[in-house]
Image (tube, coloured by chain):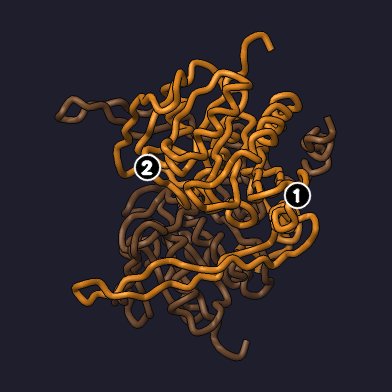
Chain colours: A brown, B orange
Amino acid sequence: MAEKPLILISNDDSINSPGIAVLVEIMLKIGEVIVVAPDGPQSAQGHSITIEDPIRLSKVNTFKGVTAYQCSGTPVDCVKIAIDKLLSRQPDLMVSGINHGSNASINVLYSGTMSAAVEASIDGMPAIGFSLCDFSWNANFDHCKPYIERLAREALENKLPYGNLLNVNIPPGEIKGVKVCRQAKGRWKEDFDRRHDPFGREYFWMTGQFVDMDHQEDSDEWALNNGYISVVPTMFDLTAHQQIETLKQWNLNLDKK
Amino acid sequence: MAEKPLILISNDDSINSPGIAVLVEIMLKIGEVIVVAPDGPQSAQGHSITIEDPIRLSKVNTFKGVTAYQCSGTPVDCVKIAIDKLLSRQPDLMVSGINHGSNASINVLYSGTMSAAVEASIDGMPAIGFSLCDFSWNANFDHCKPYIERLAREALENKLPYGNLLNVNIPPGEIKGVKVCRQAKGRWKEDFDRRHDPFGREYFWMTGQFVDMDHQEDSDEWALNNGYISVVPTMFDLTAHQQIETLKQWNLNLDKK
């Protein structure tokens, strides 16, 4: 590579979260860094975009010597506005995180951190979302650093085909190694907490329990529960290709019946 | 089936949109209907959920003789709270829409209407998202009705495997037939409109152009551009399974180098 690789960084926990600061520190060892991240928490925003409200964008000095912007929109908005208004060339890599909390299994769908990486991949950038399975704001990220650096360097060297990205989850504590996995079959069993406001009106808080319906050794949940970093190759083509031929047998054309 | 099939209905354009009223009208011909839909517009909310704010839920009389609730949350919230607090048994089918505007190609990721259907499929319901490729609030849905009824009846009869749902998009005007397709490769090329508020501060509106990078005859965009209804079997497993073996060749374990 003639020039240093350009690396775009975002997340969903906000530009002020400890996780993104660690990611900036690691990526500065590898290339030139630009950060565009939400100005406040945007967890569980999935692939939402801001179309009903204006979006604000401000240059900030959050990271010493690094070009960085905070954005009032969602994580996906951050990537979109970076591409349209801020980047002078196509980044060689986009990294998102480090998320405070797991984005394994079905969480990939709800996660703003992963959706930012998905959006980057739609726009043709190799992308990786990193998450530490520890929701604490004061989580210890030290053990993640050498693995994240290695993963980013490997992604730059090996490339990913268009439309693919990586969902990387890291267990807290000692790491046994890295496993390439598939997304575990799992879901959240909701338990909405019913309350009443001071005016007697009912409202709900979303709570729930994650249910692992998988338990197979090639799933990301298994890897994480057994001390491994999980790396799931991920894509934005949601087509269930294996169902196309079956569906063609359905009686869907009105003139056929 | 001993009892009438139970059908859960949601959308993202709000419970007061013309599209959902048409869907209720069609589904009442097939089964027992319960509606849980957003109390206001929730377009482009993707798979976001409400975790930082309380959620309100109110019974409404929007549709004559139909049990219906409006919810202050996102489309995915609507499905989750229906399952936890409102449904007495597992629905035989979940339908979402009729969306005012296309959810073909990459729009499946941004769409609240499709995310509600995806959420239902995670919870084990056969699910279909319906969209009319016409953003107008006063769009004519008449030509959609017999096709939507047929699709819903076929889904009830043929079942879908766990984890699969359908993304159905309908062109405006005359329909040539129904095509089973894959999600077209496409993306939005953003063009953020830069403005200044009355206080001189900069802000942006997200605008953009859809770019069809596909043009193949088996894609949903091709079907729609040629007068066909597109039916894309869709799934929430984002694993790029075909990449797993390639990734295993990467040098990701620190002790290996």
Write down the residue under mark 2: B40
Q: Residue at x 79, y 55 (%)?
A: B218
Nearest the eye: A1 or B63? B63
Q: Residue at x 39, y 67 (%)?
A: B205
Give the farthest residue toward the left. A198
Q: Quadrant of residue B195?
A: bottom left
Nearest the eye: A66 or A179? A66
Q: Please give the chain letter of the residue carrying mark 2.
A: B
**Above or below, comparing residue A2 to residue A132 in the picture:** below
Give the farthest residue toward the top. B2
**Above or below, comparing residue B81 to residue A236 in the picture:** above
Q: Position of residue B94 (x, y in %)?
A: 58, 30
Q: Please give the chain letter of the residue carrying mark 1.
A: B
Query: Which element carries disc 2, helix, strand or loop?
Result: loop
Q: Position of residue A150 (x, y in %)?
A: 57, 68
Which amino acid, by three-letter code, is at mark 2? Gly
Query: Which element carries disc 1, helix, strand or loop?
Result: loop
Q: Residue at x 56, y 79 (%)?
A: A90
Share a chain, discs 1 and 2? yes
**Above or below, comparing residue B33 to residue A52 in the picture:** above
Q: Which mark is residue A215?
A: none
Q: Residue at x 42, y 40 (%)?
A: B14
Residue B205 seen in the figure? yes
Quadrant in which the C terminus of chain B is drawn: bottom right
CB within 8 Å, label 1 to label 2: no
N-terminal of the pair, mark 1 or mark 2, is 2
Instruction: Give the foreground label among 1 and 2.
Output: 2
Q: Which mark is residue B181?
A: 1
